[in-house]
Image: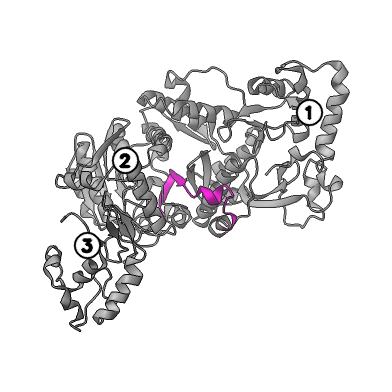
């Protein structure tokens, strides 16, 4: 079986014979006489590199093979899959984002599908899954002569060629996650909205992998964008080039930053556009070149690339950051969040918005170090990722205004009330006074903790989101439209109502952060915006005053989960009608994409619980009534409200972790 790896043998003696076979002549191993094992000549281990195990005598080699390879092997249908230390599987780069190391790791070779697995327990589960699917050794060896072609996937009219095991990052260099489709469509709508302001745009996909995101930009936006796809892995760069040819896009390869690359890009005007493919470290590339749009989507946290991203980003450009280290951001690994983001967090009912504000705070600090400020266009936190998109405002004044919006949060662990700390350098004698609740006076010990530092300002820009919605309608992206509509209602903090974006007439001029930006095709009158020139000092001063005046119109921070604050023995009203009750009481209210049962409102927690209990019915009445409870039960409701606020120790439902 020539298709089988040398680490897969039937007996230990077969493995020992490989030590006497020269490299590349393993097929003749069976012809070697066994009495040669005792010849006394020093032989090297066939499954270990020379720097790991030096050549030795036959008895020592036999002991090494038996203890380090044969005893930890995995058996399947008479064969033993021994552990292999050869350079068959390079170690993946760690999440810190360092260069790929030349160090090789121990692994197993699957006899069925030829996959490489690092751990023995994972190998046992891998073989067990093959058995459950009815996949046997003979079936795969018979088909191994004809190598199956790589799979081709299609997303938004863009074809992409993927490697086997493309959805498992530990098994492939070019990772492609189908669950990140919403993320890619959000970024595409962002870039399409930015392309209406100025053309052409220098765009960078810093971590290309398969290149699907940059391919969508170039294929659907055409000459409005100049796309650069970068990846440090050589196999990924090759795959990106193949995917460009698959989509009939011209490729400009540039492994080193040269001036001739720009000339080549101008000469070759393809039918759909050109894509420059680079192979270098993302930090180096962002230091060497300037861009209008940068997207960062590394494996894990992105804090190591933020300084480089803001170093050369053009004025009024956009930086989008996708963070997939949700274990630390969602407070499952709090020590990692403290190490990467320098903040203290705990698991709360609003943990997804807390994660978004942590990432925005890290982005804001990186921008401020480069004398740049940011305006948050939107922030999305879903199951698999946290996406933050910001617009860059150059100048120290904007940087100072941005830094002031990073504050600490006081969180009550009993009732989960929360409030940002007041500005000022003076030490407050009793910080518990800032909380609206009275848990510290009625409960023993310390009841509140300090979280942060966090971004304390708005997370959404309504004007930009409406332009994104129009672009999604224009390009036929139906999957992303419900999410963008939810973001628009959340930014305005209003209940969902009908509105239309059939024509861009009402979107031709949006004012974002005091900057009037036209979205029509005629951009000649706004050349100063397209060129990214700095505004004068008077304009910046007026901008700061306008931001202070508009602070009251921002959406309220954080949200409440209706289930976390329900009272035992009471049926809650329907969520839609509960939003109407809060609105009738004079509070701003909307749903939130962070939590399907979350309610974003400026109502204090005491009023929130009071209205929730007022329109709830006792369980024994059967069914959920949407009206007021009877007047005879008003005293009972009042008693329940008082109990839920003042007697948290006995009402265990108020403290949930």
Q: Earlier in the sequence, mark 1 or mark 3?
A: 3
Q: Is 473 placed left or right of 406 in the picture? A: left
Q: Residues within 10 Å of mark 1 (few under 14, many from 20)?
A: some
Q: Start and end of the magenta stretch? A: 312-335
Front-most of residues 370 and 636: 636
Q: Residues within 10 Å of mark 2 (few under 14, many from 20)?
A: many
Image coordinates for residue 401, horizontal then vertical, percent: 59, 48
Quarter that holds the N terminus: bottom left
Image coordinates for residue 291, horizontal then vertical, percent: 37, 47
Which residue appears at 36% of the width and 32% of the height? 524
In what element is the residue under mark 2?
helix
Numbered mark located on residue 440 in the image: none
Q: Are marks 2 and 3 in contact (CB under 8 Å)?
A: no
Q: Is 623 placed left or right of 444 in the picture? A: left
Does residue 328 show up magenta in the picture?
yes
Q: Earlier in the sequence, mark 2 or mark 1?
A: 2
Numbered mark located on residue 610 in the image: 1
Q: CA distance from mark 2 to mark 1?
A: 50 Å
């Amino acid at each position: 079986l020539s298709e089988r790896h040398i680490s897969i043998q039937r007996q230990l003696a077969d493995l020992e014979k490989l030590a006497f076979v020269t490299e590349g002549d393993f097929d003749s191993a069976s012809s070697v006489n066994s009495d040669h094992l005792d010849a006394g000549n020093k032989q090297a281990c066939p499954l270990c590199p020379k720097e790991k195990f030096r050549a030795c005598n036959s008895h020592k080699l036999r002991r090494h093979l038996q203890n380090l390879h044969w005893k930890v092997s995995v058996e399947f249908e008479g064969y033993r899959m021994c552990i292999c230390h050869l350079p068959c599987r390079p170690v993946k780069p760690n999440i810190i984002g360092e260069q790929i190391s030349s160090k090789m790791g121990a692994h197993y070779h699957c006899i069925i599908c030829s996959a490489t697995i690092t751990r023995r327990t994972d190998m046992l589960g891998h073989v067990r899954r093959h058995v459950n699917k009815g996949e046997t050794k003979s079936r795969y060896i018979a088909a191994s002569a004809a190598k199956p072609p790589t799979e081709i996937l299609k997303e938004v009219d863009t074809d992409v060629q993927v490697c086997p095991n493309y959805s498992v990052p530990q098994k492939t260099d070019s990772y492609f996650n189908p669950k990140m489709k919403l993320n890619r469509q959000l970024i595409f709508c962002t870039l399409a909205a930015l392309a209406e302001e100025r053309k052409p745009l220098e765009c960078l996909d810093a971590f290309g992998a398969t290149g699907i995101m940059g391919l969508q930009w170039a294929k659907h936006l055409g000459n409005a964008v100049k796309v650069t796809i970068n990846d440090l892995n050589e196999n990924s760069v090759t795959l990106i080039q193949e995917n460009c040819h698959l989509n009939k896009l011209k490729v400009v390869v540039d492994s080193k930053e040269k001036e001739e690359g720009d000339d080549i890009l101008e000469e070759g005007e393809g039918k759909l556009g050109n894509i420059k493919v680079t192979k270098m470290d993302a930090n180096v590339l962002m230091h060497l070149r300037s861009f209008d749009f940068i997207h960062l989507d590394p494996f894990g946290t992105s804090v190591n690339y933020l300084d480089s991203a803001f170093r050369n980003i053009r004025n009024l450009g956009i930086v989008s950051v996708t963070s997939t280290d949700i274990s630390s951001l969602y407070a499952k690994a709090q020590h990692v969040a403290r190490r990467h983001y320098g903040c203290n967090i705990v698991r709360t009912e609003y943990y997804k918005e807390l994660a978004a504000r942590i990432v925005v705070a890290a982005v804001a600090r990186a921008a401020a170090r480069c004398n740049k400020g940011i305006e948050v266009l939107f922030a999305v936190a879903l199951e698999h990722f946290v996406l933050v998109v910001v617009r860059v405002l150059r100048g120290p004044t904007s940087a100072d205004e941005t830094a002031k919006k990073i504050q600490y949060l006081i969180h009550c662990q009993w009732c989960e009330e929360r409030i940002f700390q007041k500005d000022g350098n003076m030490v407050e004698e009793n910080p518990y006074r800032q909380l609206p609740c009275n848990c510290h006076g009625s409960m023993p010990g310390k009841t509140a903790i300090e979280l942060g530092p966090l971004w304390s300002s708005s997370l959404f820009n309504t004007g930009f989101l409406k332009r994104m919605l129009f672009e999604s309608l224009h390009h036929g992206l139906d999957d992303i439209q419900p999410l963008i509509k939810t973001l628009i209602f959340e930014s305005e903090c209003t209940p969902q109502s009908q509105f239309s974006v059939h024509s861009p007439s009402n979107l031709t001029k949006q004012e974002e952060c005091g900057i009037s930006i036209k979205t029509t095709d005629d951009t000649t009158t706004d050349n100063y915006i397209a060129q990214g020139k700095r505004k004068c000092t008077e304009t910046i001063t007026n901008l700061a005053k306008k931001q202070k005046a508009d602070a009251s119109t921002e959406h309220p921070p954080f949200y409440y989960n209706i289930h976390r604050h329900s009272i035992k023995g009471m049926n809650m009203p329907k969520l839609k009608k509960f939003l109407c009750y809060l609105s009738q009481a004079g509070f701003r209210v909307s749903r939130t994409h962070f939590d399907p049962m979350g309610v974003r409102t400026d109502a204090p927690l005491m009023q929130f619980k009071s209205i929730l209990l007022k329109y709830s019915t006792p369980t024994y009445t059967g069914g959920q009534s949407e009206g007021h409870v009877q007047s005879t039960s008003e005293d009972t409701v009042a008693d329940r409200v008082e109990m839920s606020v003042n007697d948290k120790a006995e009402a265990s439902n108020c403290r949930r972790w």
